[in-house]
Image: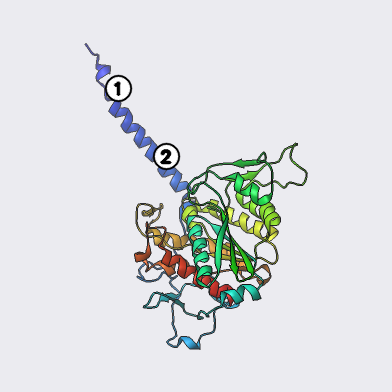
């Protein structure tokens, strides 16, 4: 026969489970309250606008006569960024969806072959995550559409893997062994390095994609020891490896297109993203070759889907599109001094969240788009760096 103590509720499994859940929920609420400033992102936008997101004090004004506008150029972008302290935000698609007009300048037609020749561009590198891979492929399509030819020289096989392949980098660097390489799992299965040789007649152009799914990550490092050759340079992150080891050995890019990896960075605490972006920009300033023109390209927005659900913070629930805009706005003050110094050759681009906001019909999975989007993006980028 059970005693009275055996019948008391605290002896039941349900009782213990319920109180464990309550305790866990209480601790979580305390943690979020104490760290709420680390989770809350900028809310300086007006989500009620259907076709574009803007801070409340900003208004878009489009000229009816596009021919009266000056050509878009790096200098005009820099002047606009200085005036509005933001990536250019006002734009709209034409009815044919072939062109995206912005409010302060017009895109100039360009001859890519002549542009590459006159500007002495011999090596282009695209840096980024899986969206950066797609931009890279769009750039190859643009080159071939402008009467160039491209052939693959090297690929970081296998095609879908989260493990870096050191053989690719050993071949490119001319290293005979991988003893100093340390690798770890990437959070991106399609971020595989690849390089193509393209030709416009007799002129050769090297185009390469290299992964950077975060501003700083340790998927590939070079950690030296006593047995390492004296002429080797160590690197404690993938980004440090690229700027300190890879580019000096393989060749400094004339043009470096960095599609900001906000689809991955959005999953991190904002303070961690800001810390690593500061670190990355210091790395760039210290090790980027003087000749290299770097373009920082905001990532496109996200539509609701399996891979991009609603975003919850202690103070607000965000649509994924609005959250990406807010995260870019949060990071802009860190990038601003670099974008405004012409001697650094670090350039801005369009706010791609607004550019993508009305193009749900081009979305594949909420995050990635069809080739049409990346082809338009490559076309506009080429117009800007060829101007």
User: How far separated are the C-alphas under marks 2 and 1?
Assistant: 24 Å
Pointer 2 with pointer 1, Cβ within 8 A: no
Judge whether 10 appears above or below 209 on screen. Answer: above
| Residue drawn 61% across the image and 56% down it | 280
| Residue drawn 55% across the image and 69% down it | 148
Residue nearer the viewer, 29 or 131: 131
Residue farthest right in this picture = 230
Residue nearer the viewer, 154 or 210: 154
Secondary element under disc 1, as helix, strand or loop, is helix
Judge whether 339 appears above or below 306 on screen. Answer: below
Secondary element under disc 2, as helix, strand or loop, is helix
Question: Mark 2 or 1 closer to N-term?
Answer: 1
Q: Is residue 26 left or right of residue 8?
A: right
Q: Is residue 384 left or right of residue 362?
A: right
Percent across and percent down for residue 4 are: 24, 16
Q: Quadrant of the C terminus?
A: bottom right
Q: Is residue 264 left or right of residue 305?
A: right
Percent across and percent down for residue 322 are: 41, 62
Residue farthest left in this picture = 1
Q: Quadrant of residue 343?
A: bottom right
Q: What residue sits right under mark 1 in the picture?
A: 11
Percent across and percent down for residue 114 are: 61, 77
Judge whether 29 appears above or below 56 on screen. Answer: above
Residue nearer the viewer, 219 or 43: 219
Q: Quadrant of residue 304?
A: bottom left
Is residue 80 in view? yes
Is residue 78 in view? no
What is the image's colouring?
Answer: rainbow
Crowding near the residue tagged with mark 1, few <14, some 14–19, many ≥20 C-alpha atoms within 10 Å: few
| Residue drawn 50% across the image and 71% down it | 145
Q: What residue sits right under mark 2 in the picture?
A: 27
Instruction: Say the numbered circle drawn on residue 239.
Output: none
């Amino acid at each position: 026969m059970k005693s009275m103590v055996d019948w008391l509720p605290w002896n039941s499994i349900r009782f213990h489970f319920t109180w464990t859940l309550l305790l866990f929920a209480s601790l979580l609420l305390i943690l979020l309250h104490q760290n709420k400033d680390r989770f809350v992102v900028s809310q300086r936008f007006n989500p009620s606008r259907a076709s574009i997101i803007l801070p409340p004090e900003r208004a878009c004004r489009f000229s009816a006569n596009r021919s009266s506008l000056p050509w878009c150029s790096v200098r005009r972008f820099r002047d606009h960024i200085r005036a509005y302290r933001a990536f250019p935000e006002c734009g709209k698609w034409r009815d044919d969806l072939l062109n995206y007009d912005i409010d302060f300048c017009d895109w100039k037609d360009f001859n890519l072959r002549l542009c590459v020749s006159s500007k002495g561009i011999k090596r282009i590198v695209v840096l980024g995550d899986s969206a950066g891979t797609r931009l890279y492929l769009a750039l190859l399509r643009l080159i071939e559409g402008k009467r160039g030819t491209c052939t693959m020289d090297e690929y970081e096989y296998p095609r879908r893997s989260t493990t870096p392949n050191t053989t690719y980098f050993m071949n490119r660097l001319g290293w005979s062994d991988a003893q100093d390489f340390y690798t770890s799992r990437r959070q991106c299965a399609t971020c595989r390095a690849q390089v193509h040789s393209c030709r416009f007649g007799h002129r050769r152009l090297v185009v390469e994609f290299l992964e950077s799914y975060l501003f700083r990550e340790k998927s590939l490092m070079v950690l030296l020891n006593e047995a390492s050759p004296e002429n080797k340079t160590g690197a404690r992150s993938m980004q440090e490896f690229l700027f300190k080891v890879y580019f000096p050995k393989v060749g400094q890019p004339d043009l470096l297109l960095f599609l900001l990896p906000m689809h991955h960075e959005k999953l991190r605490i904002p303070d961690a993203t800001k810390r690593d972006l500061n670190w990355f920009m210091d790395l760039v300033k210290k090790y980027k070759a003087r000749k290299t023109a770097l373009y920082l390209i905001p990532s496109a927005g996200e539509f609701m889907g399996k891979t991009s659900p609603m975003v919850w913070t202690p103070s607000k629930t965000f649509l994924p599109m609005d959250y990406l805009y807010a995260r870019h706005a949060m990071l802009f003050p860190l990038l601003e001094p670099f974008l405004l110094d012409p001697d650094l050759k670090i350039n801005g681009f369009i706010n791609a969240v607004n550019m993508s906001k009305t193009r749900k019909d081009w979305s594949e999975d909420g995050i990635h788009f069809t080739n049409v989007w990346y082809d338009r993006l490559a076309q506009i980028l080429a117009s800007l760096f060829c101007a």
